[in-house]
Image (cartoon, rainbow, N blue to C red):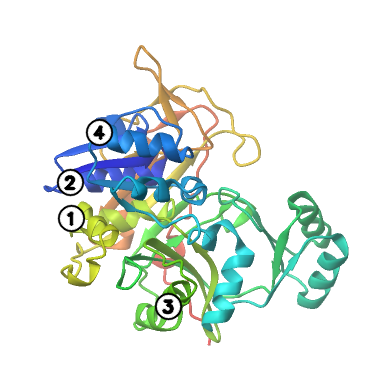
Amino acid sequence: MRVLLVGGGGREHALALGLAGDPAVEALFAAPGNPGIAAVAQLREVTPTDPAAVAALAVEVAADLVVIGPEAPLVAGVADAVRAKGIAVFGPSAEAARLEGSKTFAKDVMTAAGVPTARAYTCEDAAAVVRALDEFGAPYVVKDDGLAAGKGVVVTDDRAAAERHAAECGRVVIEEYLSGPEVSLFVVTDGEAAVPLLPAQDFKRVGDGDTGPNTGGMGAYAPLPWAPPNLVDDVMRDVVHPTLAELRRRGTPFAGLLYVGLAITPSGPRVIEFNARFGDPETQVVLALLETPLGGLLHAAATGTLGAHPPLRWRDGAAVTVVVAADGYPAGPRTGDVITGADRAGIIHAGTRRDADGTLRSAGGRVLCGTATGPDLAAARDAAYELVRDVELAGAHHRTDIAAAAVDGRITIPG
């Protein structure tokens, strides 16, 4: 099987490692890729959000499967253009990707499907924002209605900050706050059959103790030792299958990766958001534990044969990833700084570039991820931080508390 992977971040590096490890994958291409991906795939230049260019590249490399990593190409219709060439693609159509591209659309689907989620209003002017904030009260949850690279959500007790974010975004969804620990559940689906992966937890705030602004994610771990034993079954029954059925009913079936972001509230799991692709950095830990060949799994979803795929196999133990971010991230990350200590197993490249002379430099806000497995969560955490400690990047910062509460048994389910 010849596979073309679209994207160039940490998620795509993790996907590339998984695909390269599948014996059925005889050739792996990545566009545009990154220096880490270059170790396991042939890199090609392409604009990931250009449907025609990606489809032409898929034909050029004779791809049997195209895997689309980021959300922007999906919303732009890249999967549709590739399918029109008769090539199997892992990723939803532009219409189905509106689950992530528009939070209003996602709320409409959830309401129609009876999915448990927060009450919400879509607001397009200051008066509507004031009414919604008054009704729900603090903490205020204000979400940019469109794509915002994981940084369009503000959760704050500061009323002025909430109103300011709404004004900056224009069209926003304002929700009631959902209390309780958060869970990310990835579900591989061909539109009918649906296969859940291991639940994970990520860390959105930039600082220790969940302080500071939201980011694209500063670390993650899996599995979740504190999660209720029936969590995945309940979410599949109450959230995933009703949502897929509603999208089929609308004539826009969802095939690809359905990301379900959940809060485990006193009333049970509630959906915070849907995404239309693998989450970053949770992908790094979930795929590190997946023993089933990744290429075959994604190809089954892309070709409508997921129902016949064998049950997934998972490695024992746990995985932790810690993100190393550039100076100034997330507000104004500095790029172009030299990186050393990054060319080792377990280092995932998220925002890097390599000079002609081989020098590795930072090229994004989230630069690298130290990803490690271990026999238990504590061992995996220690190994991930050991990887991060050996990376040198001027002004870089990372959280020091990734998975700490889970290791210490400090996460409780409200009830």
First in sequence: mark 4 or mark 2? 2
Task: Name which of mark 1 and mark 3 comes first in the sequence.
Answer: 3
Label 2: which residue? 21
Quadrant assignment, res 179: bottom right
Q: Secondary structure at mark 2?
A: loop
Q: Residue at x 40, y 43 (%)?
A: 10
Labels 2 and 1 touching (C-beta < 8 A): yes
Residue 115 visible in the current orientation: no
Task: Assess whether mark 1 and mark 4 are in contact (beta carbons under 8 angstroms).
Answer: no
Query: Image check: 272 left or right of 52?
Result: right
Q: Residue at x 49, y 29 (%)?
A: 363
- Do the residues under discs 1 and 3 have CB atoms within 8 angstroms? no
Badge 2 amino acid:
Gly
Dot 1: few (<14), some (14–19), or many (≥20) neighbours within 10 Å? Answer: some
Residue denoted by label 4: 61
Task: Tell me the element at label 4.
Answer: loop
Disc 2 to disc 1, how far (Cα)?
A: 7 Å
Of circles 1 and 3, the one toward us is 3
SS for callout 3:
helix
Residue highlighted by disc 3: 245
Task: Find disc 1 in the rendering and name its residue.
Answer: 293
Vertically, is 286 above or below 227? above
Nearest the viewer among 54 and 295 is 54
Neighbour tally class for label 3: few under 14, some 14-19, many 20 plus, Cα within 10 Å: some
Residue 251 horizontal side relative to residue 198, left or right: right
Compute the Cα span from label 1 to label 3: 28 Å
Q: CA distance from mark 4 to mark 2?
A: 20 Å
Residue 245 picture quarter = bottom left
Give the mark nearest the N terminus, 2 or 3.
2
Q: CA distance from mark 4 to mark 3?
A: 35 Å
Please tell me which of labels 2 and 1 falls first in the chain: 2
